[in-house]
Amino acid sequence: MAKLVYALNQSLDGYVDYMEFAPDTDLFRHFIEDVRASAGTIYGRNMYEVMRYWDEEHPEWGAPEREYAEVWRKQPKWVVSGTLKSVGPNATLVSDNLEATVRDLKSRLSGYMEVSGPQLAHSLSKLGLIDEYRMYLHPVVIGAGKRYFAGPLSRLRLTATDRIGADVIRLTYVPA
């Protein structure tokens, strides 16, 4: 049975605006290995549209960006959207029965899957489907944007802290 993990970068004040901070070399390497190891990712529409950047080649990329794009393209993706009519390569559109779809994926897959997008993560949390929360805490304060948590949750329990690269702390929580 696969574990469902909600993992995103966030600022010290709780925002997930990826345009405000980028991973350093060590954190980027960590994310390459994380994507390689996961059984797939469940995306909300907005996060999926952001991540589609990796579907296209960009001439300014170095070797790490090309490697990330390669592993991201191979990874199975499920995109939750009521408005999209189609999704890109190696992706499946989920337009209804979210809970049944995620329960089925968790029962069929092994290892872990990630969920990406604060609103989607909140919906899945309310259904009791998220097994772990990973916050990659960056030393920036941005003051606005989307929050890591889109709404209140039951109490969480800290299970690990890890320093990744020079400045990022990963906090790992599970439902208490």
Image (spheres, rainbow, N blue to C red):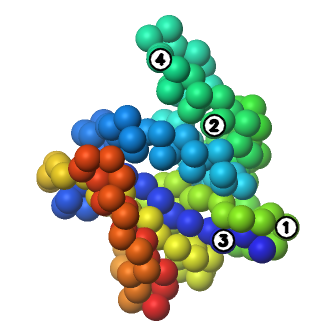
**Tag 1 secondary structure:** helix
Which sits earlier in the primary sequence, circle 2 or circle 1?
A: 2
Measured from the top left, where is residue 5 in percent x and y?
56, 66
Crowd tier of the residue under label 3, counting other residues whose Cα lies within 10 Å: few below 14, some 14–19, many 20 or above: some
The reply to whether residue 15 is in sight is: no
Q: Earlier in the sequence, mark 4 or mark 1?
A: 4
Tell me which amino acid carries mark 1: Arg
Q: As rendered, which of 17 and 81 lies closer to the eye?
A: 17
Q: Residues within 10 Å of mark 1 (few under 14, many from 20)?
A: few
Q: Which residue is mark 4?
A: 62
Question: Residue 1: where, in percent of width, then height?
Answer: 78, 74
Q: Is residue 117 above or below residue 77?
A: below
> The residue tagged with tag 3: helix, strand or loop?
strand
**Mark 4 belongs to which amino acid?**
Gly
- Tell me the residue that label 3 is attached to: 3
Cα separation between marks 2 and 4 = 16 Å
Name the one closer to the observer, 79 or 133.
133
What amino acid does circle 3 point to? Lys
Q: CA distance from mark 2 to mark 3?
A: 19 Å
Q: Amino acid at mark 2?
A: Trp
Q: Which residue is mark 1?
A: 108
Q: Which quadrant would residue 10 be assigned to in this image?
A: bottom left
Q: CA distance from mark 4 to mark 1?
A: 36 Å
The answer for how far apart the CA atoms under marks 3 and 1 are is: 11 Å
Q: Is residue 31 visible?
A: yes
- Residue at horizontal 37 percent and vertical 35 percent from the top: 25
Which secondary structure lies at badge 2?
Answer: helix
Label 2 Cα crowd, 10 Å radius (few <14 / some 14-19 / many 20+)? many
Query: Is 13 situated left or right of 76 in this image?
Result: left
User: Horizontally, is 62 left or right of 22 in the view?
Assistant: right
Q: Nearer the viewer, mark 2 or mark 4?
A: 4
